[in-house]
Amino acid sequence: MKNVKNYLLIVLATVLQLQFIACGNGGNDPTPTDSFDVQFVLPSSIDVSEGGEYTFSVTGGGGRSPLTTDQFVLESTAGISYVCKIIDSSAEYFTVRLAGECVTSYYNVFIKRDTRKKSFGKLYINIVDELPDFTPDENTTVYGVVATDEGGVAGVVVSDGEDVTATDERGIYQLKSKKKWGYVFISVPSGYEVPSAGVLPLFHDDLKSGAGTIERVDFTLEKLNRHQDTYKVFMLGDMHLANRTGDLAQFRDFTSDLTDYMSAHSGELMYAIALGDMTWDLYWYSRNFSFPEYLKNVNEQIKGLQIFHTMGNHDNDYKTTSDFAAALPYVNNIAPTYYSFNIGKIHYIVLDDIDCSNYDGTDSRDYEKRISDEQLSWLQKDLAYVDKATPLVVATHAQLFYPLTTTTFKIDHDTTNTQRLFDILDGYKVHFVTGHTHMMFNVTPEDAASLTGNRDFYEHNSGSICGSWWWSGYHTLGINLGQDGTPGGYAVWNITGTEFKYFYKATGYSENYQFRSYDLNEVAFSTSDIPDCPASVRSKFQKYIEAYPESDKNEVLINIWNWNRNWTLTVIDENGKELEWKHTNAYDPLHIAALTVPRFNDASLTSAPNFITTSFSHFFKVTADNADVDLTITVRDEFGHEWTENMQRPKAFSTDAYKNN
């Protein structure tokens, strides 16, 4: 009986083996009953006209091509199938006529023979218009057309982040691209806009194939039916959205404020530049809040505004070990890390000055404030198309300069490449716009003359939307301040031709809210403000007590956050006496009360808390004759805007007294 069983097992195994061999493909097809012997090269992408034809190369020797009676099936990511006719087939190639309903997209590719259907992988199909009498140059790997509905646009600058070129008279460009970054972008020309995906302007597109494959990428421009010389640009500093500390509700306060401002100026052209740190890398993982969640919030709340984005240090993936890898989530969701565009008579440049080359995969985030050699090389090529008479606005996340005193500055950046940047920008009038500090300062050419070689360079460190990472508004509802006391908000730049006028718009306040005054007879801090603070940490609060003890010196402190050397301050008492002011570094009392006190008043502390009040440079102090004399405080900017407070003294100090002041 045992021998009979063994014999039956051998016979069964032989039958199964014969069936397995008969199915072909060496047993590699997971569904052998659907297999048939077709082999061909499936590119990662193809360019084909609507309803046009494409020829595929057959591999594996003769007899591996499909039959003309087979069906070439494309299945979209939505699961919709399109049947394409095989119109010609030979031992070396076969030609398919694309279904007219196919659009530019990714498709899964199948060949269907009778009841059998075999999968061959994924294909990106790019539907393009034919270019008669055009053949790409030798070694071209990326080419395309930049056009409006009326036809191609000449002179549009195009780049892959390394090479830079411009479109010819037909709007055609060609690049011998190595495809390092995997995208190509245009420098939107003056007088045109690009379509949008929510707030994101579509000036760039992903490449779909490797460096050895030529591919076509077209861009669409929309010609404005009005002059573009007069417009507004909103400079949007750090947002730090992470779904914590009530940030999403406070962010809605900002978007409501911006929407109201835009509505009040409807009919005007408006754009925006986000200055980095839209997200917070640590919370990509711990709270599952990254770029898709940021875009969902901003697209739901802001309409009719294109936002050009700058990459911040917290927009890099800290779990990576190279600058390139750290940038990929941002690149895949937002934009290239550096690029340029034009609005009216101004050329805008966005650079990535956060070098993550030393990242080690931990949350140490060992970055350097540095603009890479690659970017500087690209910038030189980009500026070859920009006349020296054209003013430049250069957006980076981190500051280039930083105040040493109330009137002096240092370079706060990699010295070597920053000097190279200055040399490349030589001869242009340049306005650097930066974020990162969550504070606010301005540098004029006179301030930085010794650092820039007397070049016509400005820096506007532009404040932040989130203030102190949303903490002050979390602890004290309605008080959103940076560590220097600058209210959370955004800058508004009014551009006319080549002239700039700018001011800071505090969220929830009128445009007239440009400074804050304190009667220091009414301001005092002591250890009684932080009764729950552990004794081991209490000494860290001492600097605020020393700055603001009980006082009857009749001093008044004024915080003018957007101050520069071209502003003026006048303080006159009720008797007509003009008081002499002193420019000084100081801690903002309201920030101490709204954020630093509640942060210190925590029994669980083992060290000084984060995000507490910082001494900064845009404060001014006057001394009144007595405790009851009223003051008229007048601040004037370089554009002739004037703001006045009739300060009645004594002026009470509390967080409630300063809400929506």
Image (cartoon, grey):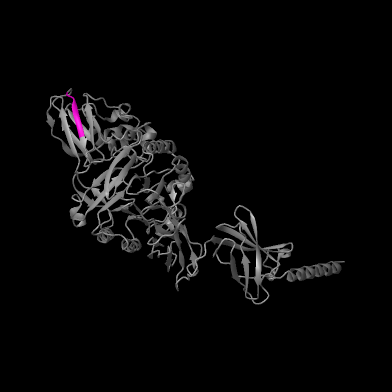
Q: Quadrant of the N terminus?
A: bottom right
Q: Main secondary structure of the magenta part?
A: strand
Q: Is residue 10 magenta?
A: no
Residue found at the far right of this picture: 1
Residue 254 in the image: x percent, y percent?
39, 38
What segment is highlighted magenta in the picture?
A: 629-634
Q: Tell me what residue is drawn at x 61 percent, y 52 percent.
A: 78
Residue 265 in the image: x percent, y percent?
36, 38
Q: Nearer the viewer, residue 537 or 151?
A: 151
Q: Tell me what residue is drawn at x 57 percent, y 57 percent.
A: 103
> Is 575 on the left or on the right of 504, as rendered?
left
Residue 174 sits in which quadrant? bottom left
Residue found at the far top of this picture: 628
Q: Does residue 259 sit above or below 353 in this rendering?
A: above
Q: Does residue 433 sit above or below 526 in this rendering?
A: below
Q: Nearer the viewer, residue 637 or 119?
A: 637
> Is 248 on the left or on the right of 518, as rendered?
right
Residue 284 in the image: x percent, y percent?
46, 47
Q: Does residue 344 sit above or below 641 in this rendering?
A: below
Number of numbered callouts drawn? 0
> Is 30 on the left or on the right of 294, as rendered?
right
